[in-house]
Image: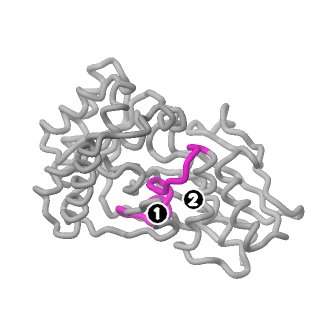
Amino acid sequence: MSDVVTAFAPASIGNVAVGFDMLGLALADVGDRVVARRAEETGVIVEEVRGLDGEKHPYLSTNADENTASIAAQALLAEHAPDLGVALKVYKGIPLQSGMGSSAASAVAAVVAVNALLDEPLTTDALLPYALEGERYASGGLHADNVAPSLLGGLILCPQVLLPDVVRLPVPEGISAVLLHPDLQVNTAQARRGLARSYKMQQWLEQQGLLAGFVAACAASDIELMRRTLRDVIIEPQRAAAVPCFDAVTDAARRSGALGCSLSGSGPSLFALCATNDARNTASAMEHACRAQGIGCQSWVSPMTAPGASVENQ
């Protein structure tokens, strides 16, 4: 058994437009890494946190009680190895406050790495509750729409009433996700606090119908039904104004042939689902629309079957 383990956890799209707090989709090729090593003293310490530039992160704390990675690791060790000491190094590959599941990825990578140090490691599915503790600290709520896809990969249905159980949804072949990250930030906890606390019955019924239709479309590989149901009539209207390029980018995505385009999580990132053959054109159209608003950006294209977290060396 190795005394040092590195784990990678991917970014994710929370809500997937139609499923607020209930749907999440993993993204390929972008994510966070955590290195965990056995330490002499019991408990968890964070030795360093480095940002996208490889330098010491200017904002994220190395206090073990204030970092999503260490909080998740502490939760795991408290139940399964209370006498074990672990030191963490966190390497951020996801921008903060980006709507790409940054805090969730750090929490997931930490529990996957620390789990590999245990004498009797848990199954991947069993790690979900511990990763959720890190996300709870960051966002102020218990929702798995970033943690679950980052851990497990693919498209995940994860209603709070079912947790820790989640459902891996089938996805149609030939459909990819495009994720556009504008050079903006939106604080998730603040965005959640700004949401209305009650809604009209008709709004709720419409949104539940859209969610049911989207899940059915995935199961039946019904692309046109996906197109008709991939929208949000409750949360998106409250959040779109915080992203100045929202209208331009969503219009550009739809004109390029995308099935739909919406905020990723609370934003500012936006995502589109589209035919895989059209994905690069859709990404280019979204980037052009964003830059035309005077906002820099970058984009990624990912299959809807992107893998979840993994141990990279052990």
Q: What element carries label 1?
A: helix
Q: How is the image coloured?
A: one colour
188 vs 298, left or right, is: right
Q: Which residue lies furthest to the right in this view?
A: 41
Distance between mark 1 and mark 2 Cα atoms? 21 Å
Which of the numbered marks, if any, corresponds to residue 161? Answer: 1
Badge 1 vs badge 2, beta-carbon distance below 8 Å: no
259 vs 181, left or right, is: left
Q: What residue type is labelled 1?
A: Val
Q: In this view, does 89 lie above or below 283?
A: below
- Residue 80, given in percent of the width and then of the height, sits at 73, 74
Picture quarter with the N terminus? bottom right
Q: Which residue lies furthest to the front in this view?
A: 201
- Tell me which label, 1 or 2, sits earlier in the chain: 2
Image: magenta residue range: 138-156
Q: Which residue lies furthest to the top in this view?
A: 294
Identified at 28% across, 45% down, the residue is 201
- How crowded is the residue under tag 1: few (<14 C-alpha within 10 Å), some, or many (20+)? few
Q: Which amino acid does label 2 sit on?
A: Val
Residue linked to disc 2: 108
User: In front: mark 1 or mark 2?
Assistant: 1
- Residue 312, given in percent of the width and then of the height, sits at 57, 65
Identified at 36% across, 22% down, the residue is 295
- How crowded is the residue under tag 2: few (<14 C-alpha within 10 Å), some, or many (20+)? many
Numbered circles on residues, count: 2
- Residue 152, given in percent of the width and then of the height, sits at 46, 66
Q: In this view, does 105 lie above or below 39?
A: above
